[in-house]
Amino acid sequence: MDYIKHNKEEHSEFKKLMKKIEKASGKEKKKLFRKLFVKLYGHHNGEEAVVFPAVKENVSGKDLDTVLEMIEEHKLGNYQFSVLERTSIENETWDAKFAVLKEVLEHHMDEEEDEFSAIAKKALSKKDREQLLEEFEEVSEKKEKEKKKDLK
Ligand SMILES: [Fe+2]
Ligand SMILES: [Fe+2]
């Protein structure tokens, strides 16, 4: 499979999971939040270690700016994740903090599916994008496991 297609599929899972978190409460909410945290930690790390560098190497100008923007958006998401992890689920600001995370991530995923994917398609061959997926999965699975351990 092509990385671009896989990316879109994973994003749609994340989007569904975020809606579930919004509706949940108490322990279930925390559990679902941590699931999202772990999965996205793997996803972001895979993109940062494998996908973004491969595309970055082959672009310039405005396209390069878009790739750099993707990386900065990850950082914003990661920051908000760490704030939420430190905030009690019972705190009255938790939902507001989560709503901000959701907005940042949805914006990021949409941009990655549209602008970034178009750039990646121009910059890399189909074969490259398939190879990229294999490497992405390797990093992403490893990082997911690390984060899971971390949160215990
Ligand atoms: Fe992504
Ligand atoms: Fe991303």
Image (tube, rainbow, N blue to C red):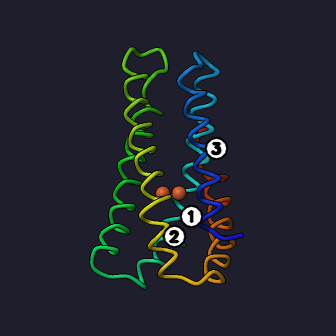
Quadrant of the frame with the N terminus: bottom right
| Distance Cα–Cα, label 3 vs label 1 | 16 Å
Task: Tell whether circle 3 marks a residue whose Cβ is less than 8 angstroms from ligand 1.
Answer: no
Which numbered dot is residue 46? Answer: 1
User: Do residues under tags 3 and 1 come within 8 Å of each other at their CB atoms?
Assistant: no
Residue that label 3 marks? 13
Q: Nearer the viewer, mark 3 or mark 2?
A: 3
Q: Quadrant of residue 74?
A: bottom left
User: Do residues under tags 1 and 2 come within 8 Å of each other at their CB atoms?
Assistant: yes
Pinpoint residue 41: horizontal percent, then vertical percent.
Answer: 54, 51
Q: Is residue 117 above or below residue 93?
A: below
Q: Residues within 10 Å of mark 1 (few under 14, many from 20)?
A: many
Q: Secondary structure at mark 3?
A: helix
Which residue is more in the foreground, 9 or 45?
9
Which residue is more in the foreground, 58 or 28?
58
Which residue is more in the foreground, 38 or 22?
22
User: Do residues under tags 3 and 2 come within 8 Å of each other at their CB atoms?
Assistant: no
Q: Secondary structure at mark 2?
A: helix
- Three-letter amino acid code at the position of disc 3: Glu
144 left or right, relative to 92: right
Q: Is residue 88 above or below residue 36?
A: above
Q: Is residue 85 above or below residue 130?
A: above
Q: Residues within 10 Å of mark 2 (few under 14, many from 20)?
A: some
Taking the spot 47% from the left edge, 82% from the top edge, the residue there is: 123
Residue that label 2 marks? 49
Pinpoint residue 70: horizontal percent, then vertical percent.
Answer: 39, 61
Quadrant of the frame with the C terminus: top right
Q: Is residue 20 above or below residue 54?
A: above
| Distance Cα–Cα, label 3 vs label 2 | 21 Å
Q: Nearer the viewer, mark 3 or mark 1?
A: 3
Taking the spot 48% from the left edge, 51% from the top edge, the residue there is: 109
